[in-house]
Amino acid sequence: MLMTEARTHQAEAFQRVDATPLPVLLQVQGVTLQYKTPQHLVTATYRVDFDVHEADRFVILGPSGCGKSTLLKAVGGFMNPVEGSMRIRGREISGPGPDRMMVFQEFEQLMPWKTVLQNVLFPMKVSGRFKGADARERALSALAKVNLSKFADVYPHMLSGGMKMRVAIARAMAMEPDILLMDEPFAALDALTRRKMQEELLGLWDQLHFTVMFVTHSIEEAILVGSRILVLSPHPGRVRAELNSTGFGHGSVDHPDFGRLSKRIHDFLFEDELAVEVRS
Ligand SMILES: Nc1ncnc2c1ncn2[C@@H]1O[C@H](COP(=O)(O)OP(=O)(O)O)[C@@H](O)[C@H]1O
Ligand SMILES: [Mg+2]
């Protein structure tokens, strides 16, 4: 069994998920997504199928331009499929909603002139979903969940990167979404910071078991962060494979199982290129 001590709690959850799968939260069936510009019709994804179950850390992995962001935008309700269907808890997705909260890249969406608490309150107020004392209570409770109660009244610039991420997650979670959507949130970070952020995200998941859809183009990050990995082909994105990635922490990067999974994913990603090389 592959797990570090820190991941034990997580591994228990995986075993539970493996034994009796939690309910399906998001169903994506035969989804083709296109952009129409006056000159071109760009097919971003082609007939993509997958299910996200509750408490999945569902990773979309694929090369640049394969339609990962487009897929996430469509789940967010900002784009409609030209064919296929996307359902959340059985309801067709027809536009953005507080049940699907996007956590943006590098957490730059935090407003520097607002305190941590005011930042968490902001979407609740703007959406009108929660108001007054109720909103405040929910915001404080979300901050407590991410262990930031003591920082409610400070400004974002006083926080570390990891803390900012926790504020961004608290802010999204205060809206009580079904799913968090994260589009390459760590892509621009240096290796060490990136690793800390991955740890921080996993630590938070160990505690809260939220459902997250996480986009990356890094095989290593997909294995570390994900519990399920959807591997997409290059442009237009089609599903190459869907794999389990359970029980891998930073401590297991050098383990042969990690290397084997990494190699398998690599082969799925580079299928066409390999075929071309053999032929030429
Ligand atoms: N607004 C847009 N208009 C036209 N084409 C777009 C637009 N956004 C993305 N694309 C194209 O759709 C494809 C998928 O893009 P994207 O989803 O951003 O890929 P990824 O996130 O995997 O890098 C690419 O070919 C890209 O050029
Ligand atoms: Mg992208």
Image: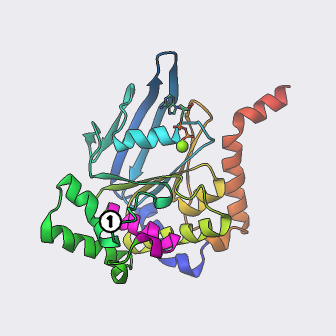
Q: Residue at x 36, y 66 (%)?
A: 113
Q: Is residue 223 left or right of residue 42?
A: right
Is residue 278 within the magenta segment?
Answer: no
Magenta region, mostly helix, strand or loop?
A: helix
In-front residue for pair 92/247: 92
Furthest residue toward top: 39
Q: Assess disc 1: are there few (<14), some (14-19) or many (≥20) residues with their C-alpha within 10 Å of its C-alpha.
A: many
Q: Is residue 116 left or right of residue 234?
A: left
Q: Which residue is under mark 1?
A: 119
In-front residue for pair 154/278: 154
- Vertical side of 124 occupied by 118: above or below: below
Whether residue 176 is visible, yes or no, is no
Whether residue 122 is visible, yes or no, is yes
Q: Which range is magenta?
A: 156-172
The reply to whether the residue tagged 1 has its Cβ within 8 angstroms of ligand 2 is: no
In-front residue for pair 84/203: 203
Q: Amino acid at mark 1?
A: Asn
Furthest residue toward right: 280
Q: Residue at x 60, y 65 (%)?
A: 194
Q: Residue at x 54, y 52 (%)?
A: 184
- Please state the horizontal and vertical placement of residue 56, each as a whole percent of the image: 43, 58
- Please state the horizontal and vertical placement of residue 78, each as a whole percent of the image: 35, 38
Image coloring type: rainbow
Is residue 165 within the magenta segment?
Answer: yes
